[in-house]
Image (cartoon, rainbow, N blue to C red):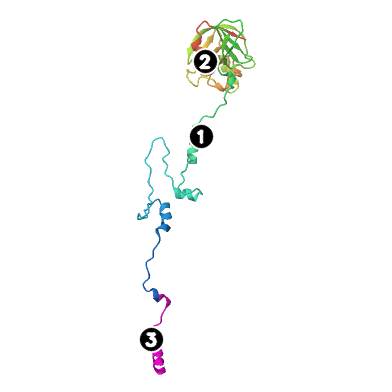
């Protein structure tokens, strides 16, 4: 019987030696990979797809937006933005530097604003002048149009610079809308000596120093007029004329007529 066992053991050893056995042979046919839907659901939701829908990777195509008048239609290169250190997909909000330069070149410099005290307002008046009279205080740079009931409408004005002050009483002899400007000969000569050449005549318009309206005083060369330099209101800057903001002289123009008494103090 021992001989039978010995023969059986020898046969088994011979069979194992003829066909070696490896550990992976037990999985010669591997079972299918099964992933729980609970694990895939968060990833599906992040991709904006409903669970169970087949996900297909679509090629990314850059779409050029339709041209819209009045808007910046520059196509943004998001890869370029990423290279410059900006997050991919972020829209560029600043125009190109050369465009900024062109824009700045056509913008006019911002002028300083006048003191609000020189804006039109109604104030108390206890002087002796009758309603309808214009009183100009050249020391405080105010023009008063006397009204009834102890009141006056007050405007800020620009007055004569040092050496060009004057005082007196006159009447409005003419009224002109967008008047022409003809500088006096002495003004032309005076400015020429400073290196500034004035025109002999300038047609009325927004660039004209007399502005939108003019009230001529008596037979003098002085006027109450508008200006193309409204930031100078409240200062002694003129050659003797009384200058006002264009909107203010237009308002005064409608309130007074030829023959109005004007007192300059």
Q: Residue furthest front?
A: 1
Q: Position of residue 19 (x, y in %)?
A: 38, 83
Question: Could you tell me how many numbered marks the image carries?
Answer: 3
Q: Is residue 162 left or right of residue 6?
A: right
CB-based contact (under 8 Å), mark 3 and mark 1: no
Q: Is residue 75 left or right of residue 222?
A: left
In this view of the protein, which residue sits in the foreground, 127 or 52?
Answer: 52
User: Is there any visible trace of residue 210 in the rendered image?
Assistant: no
Which of discs 3 and 1 lies nearer the camera? The answer is: 3
**Cα distance, mark 2 to mark 3?**
122 Å
- The residue under the point 41% across, 87% down is 13
What residue span does the magenta drawing correspond to?
1-24
Which of disc 1 and disc 3 is earlier in sequence?
A: 3
Which of disc 2 and disc 1 is earlier in sequence?
A: 1
Residue indicated by mark 1: 104
Which of discs 1 and 2 lies nearer the camera? The answer is: 2
Q: Position of residue 170 (x, y in %)?
A: 57, 6
- Is 125 magenta? The answer is no
Quadrant of the snapshot with the C terminus: top right
Residue indicated by mark 2: 249
Q: Position of residue 93 (x, y in %)?
A: 48, 41
- Is 12 magenta? The answer is yes
User: Is there any visible trace of residue 4 in the rendered image?
Assistant: yes
Mark 2 Cα-neighbour bin, 10 Å: few <14, some 14–19, many ≥20: many
SS label for mark 2: helix
**Cα distance, mark 3 to mark 1?**
95 Å
SS label for mark 3: helix
SS label for mark 1: helix
Residue indicated by mark 3: 15
């Amino acid at each position: 019987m021992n001989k039978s066992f010995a023969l059986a053991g020898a046969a088994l050893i011979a069979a194992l030696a003829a066909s070696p056995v490896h550990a992976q042979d037990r999985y010669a046919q591997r079972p299918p990979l099964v992933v729980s839907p609970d694990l895939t659901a968060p990833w599906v939701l992040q991709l904006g797809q409903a669970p169970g829908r087949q996900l297909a990777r679509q090629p990314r195509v850059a779409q050029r937006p339709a041209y819209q008048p009045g808007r910046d239609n520059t196509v943004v290169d998001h890869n370029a933005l990423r290279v410059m250190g900006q997050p991919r997909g972020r829209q560029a909000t600043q125009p190109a530097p050369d465009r900024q330069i062109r824009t700045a070149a056509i913008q006019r410099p911002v002028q300083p604003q006048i003191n609000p005290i020189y804006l039109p307002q109604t104030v108390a008046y206890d002087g002796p002048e009758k309603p309808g009279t214009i009183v100009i205080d050249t020391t405080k740079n105010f023009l008063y149009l006397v009204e009834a009931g102890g009141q006056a409408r007050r405007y800020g004005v620009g007055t004569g610079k040092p050496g060009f002050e004057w005082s007196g009483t006159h009447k409005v002899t003419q009224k002109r809308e967008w008047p022409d400007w003809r500088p006096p000969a002495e003004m032309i000569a005076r400015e020429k000596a400073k290196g500034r050449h004035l025109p002999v005549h300038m047609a009325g318009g927004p660039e004209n120093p007399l502005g939108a309206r003019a009230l001529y005083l008596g037979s003098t060369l002085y006027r109450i007029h508008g200006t193309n330099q409204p930031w100078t209101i409240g200062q002694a800057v003129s050659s003797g004329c009384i200058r006002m903001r264009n909107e203010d002289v237009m308002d005064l123009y409608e309130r007074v007529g030829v023959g109005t008494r004007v007192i300059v103090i």
